[in-house]
Image (cartoon, grey):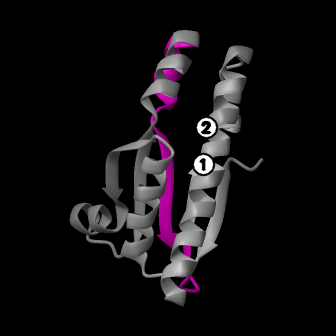
């Protein structure tokens, strides 16, 4: 089962993260946490790992609506967006598919909210790719 939506982009890793944050903001999401997995694994385990960031994103209005429908939904929030280097040097931007995520709640009232978040995440991913393409062409 696919549980993410994703895109591969060309660009410098930190610029991709910055562009993803900007695209999330443009879709009404704030980034509540930014976890640098590479740095954390180095610090805590002394292990090397590829560049990998987890952005915990939340749209307050949609979160409020969802929590009013399903109080336990908070266990699934915030929605994560990840940016990571692939083994062949590409940069992937991947978002949890909220339609799959809320499916486990088995509450039909969440379906329209999940669709809205899914559509916004699709626009975020598209925007990141478009923004980076325009920068590289300039």
C-alpha gap between disc 2 and disc 1: 6 Å
Q: Which mark is residue 117?
A: 2
Q: Is 97 on the left-hand or right-hand side of 76?
A: right
Query: In percent of the image, x 31 and y 64: which residue is there?
Result: 41
Name which quarter of the figure residue 36 lies in: bottom left
Side (left or right) of 130 relative to 79: right
Q: x, y (%) of residue 106?
A: 72, 18
Q: In this picture, which residue range is highlighted in magenta?
A: 70-91
Residue 60 appears at what percent x and percent y?
42, 28
Compared to 88, does 46 lie above or below? above
Residue 11, above or below 45:
below
Q: Residue at x 41, y 52 (%)?
A: 55
Secondary structure found at label 1: helix
Is residue 17 toward the left or the right of residue 100 in the image? left
Estimate how packed mark 1 is, as few (under 14), some (14 to 19) or many (20 or more) residues with alpha carbons within 10 Å.
Answer: many
The front one of 108 and 131 is: 131
Neighbour class for label 2 at 10 Å: few (<14), some, many (≥20)? many
Q: Which mark is residue 32?
A: none
Residue matched to label 1: 121
């Amino acid at each position: 089962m696919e549980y993410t939506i994703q895109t591969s982009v060309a660009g410098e890793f930190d610029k991709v993260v910055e562009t993803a944050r900007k695209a999330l903001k443009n879709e009404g999401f704030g980034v509540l946490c930014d976890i640098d997995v590479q740095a954390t694994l180095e610090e805590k385990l002394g292990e090397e790992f590829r560049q990998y960031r987890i952005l915990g994103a939340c749209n307050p209005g949609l979160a409020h609506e969802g929590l009013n429908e399903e109080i336990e939904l908070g266990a699934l929030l915030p929605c994560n967006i990840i940016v990571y280097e692939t083994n062949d040097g590409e940069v992937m931007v991947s978002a949890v598919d909220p339609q799959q995520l809320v499916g486990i709640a088995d509450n039909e009232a969440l379906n329209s909210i999940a669709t809205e978040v899914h559509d916004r995440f699709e626009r975020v991913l598209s925007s990141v790719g478009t923004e980076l393409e325009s920068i590289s062409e300039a």
